[in-house]
Image (spheres, rainbow, N blue to C red):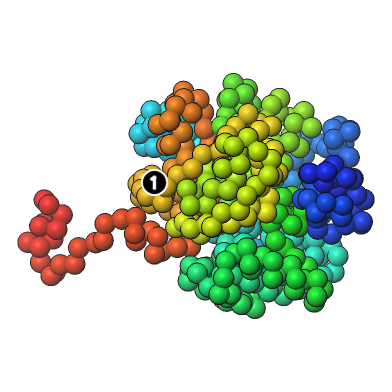
Amino acid sequence: MPLSYFQCSECGQCFEPDQVTYNCLTCGGNLDTHFSFEENPNEIDQTAILQSDEASIWRYAPLLAAPDPGYRNTPLHQVGCTPVYQPETLRKRLGMQELWIKDESRNPSASFKDRASALVVARAIEADIQTIIAASTGNAGAAMACMAASVGKKAVIIAPRSAPPAKVAQLLTFGARVVLVDGTYDQAFDLSIEASHELGWYNRNTGYNPYTVEGKKTAGLEIWEQVLRNREKFAQNLTVFIPVGDGNILSGAAKGFVDLLALGWIEKLPKLVGVQAEGSAAIYNTFHAGKDVIDPVSAKTIADSISVDLPRDGLRALKRVRQSGGYFLTVSDQEILRAIPTLGKAGLFVEPAAAAAFAGLQAAIRQGLHHPDEPALVLCTGSGLKDINAAMRAIEPAPIIEPTLKQLKEALHV
């Protein structure tokens, strides 16, 4: 394992791997992983990775901070290697030359969050930890419950009582101990940290546990392998649209690109665009104010997966977007809802947070921030089955008729 040290993303303090478990001991900032291959890229065999028949995130095990835990015939070993589509109908609709959509609903619990949970569980296996706790609006908890159950670990999930029922059903079905709080995600987050300190449980929270970014960076590695490699012109101009709540998905994907840059496998970072809901736009506000301190908001959006008052990884997401020459933008709940059936007509069924990323691309084109001639990839982070109520709000209800041909023709206007 090439992990060399952790470094605080805010104050720069460095720590040996066995010195720290979660955040910086000096200022409380989030930790970045650093590897021996940054100094010696030749120690990583690119050909071996590309020729591997492993169809999961563990094909990148030499680049990760936790070793492949095995458990090959379980969901833990089925995370990642999600498909990348080039939907012609959407490309033509937007007048674009190149459009890619990465569909994270194909992960075992049907969301991007499986990547982070897989690495956290791998670390728990390595450290012989039995119980893992997480705060979640639904997806992170479902991912954690799924990964833990697959290897016999215990999962405790604290979620807001407003979490979509489908996500709560996943938590319970996977056998997690679930507690719903009469409060916000941020309150659940703080409670989970308090519980992990008091009870000795391992905390999976994003923007807190550094292994979550390690899991999420595999999306950046896959985008390199699926899209950027052998496409020099494309690689130089790609923009990646990512939905943003607490900022950890963006930070994670960006870390994959940062590691690829250190290895010399890409020449520059793709431009990263963070898409926030108008009702949960704390990082967007900070970016456009030119500030380095994030003020909390009172989040309210249909996209529960990116509804966050105080983004726990917001500063690092800001740093990565600025480093890439990208930007943040916001979309309304109405734009998010309209994006759901638009993607559906291209064969993609996504939840509101995932639709927000595509709505962000549409908004960027309308506002002149993204030229249609420039290639773009949209990261769609979760299945529409996660939030059926939102999907039903986004579409026209089906007519109910008597079973006669006459009424069928009337209903279909034929």
Please indicate, yes or no, whether residue 94 appears anywhere in the rendered image. Answer: yes
User: What kind of residue is marked 1?
Assistant: Glu
Seen at 61% across and 77% down, the residue is 179
Q: Is residue 337 above or below residue 229?
A: below
Please indicate, yes or no, whether residue 106 appears anywhere in the rendered image. Answer: no
Q: Residues within 10 Å of mark 1 (few under 14, many from 20)?
A: many
Q: Which residue is mark 1?
A: 335
Q: Is residue 384 left or right of residue 188?
A: left
Seen at 69% across and 66% down, the residue is 190
Between 94 and 15, which is closer to the camera in this rendering?
A: 15
Between 399 and 78, which is closer to the camera in this rendering?
A: 399
Q: Is residue 65 left or right of residue 221?
A: right
Seen at 52% across and 52% down, the residue is 280
Seen at 58% across and 57% down, the residue is 309
For residue 160, what is the image quadrant? bottom right
Estimate the x, y position of residue 156 in percent, counting from the top left.
68, 74
Between 192 and 289, which is closer to the camera in this rendering?
A: 289
Q: Is residue 37 above or below residue 355?
A: above
Q: Secondary structure at mark 1?
A: helix
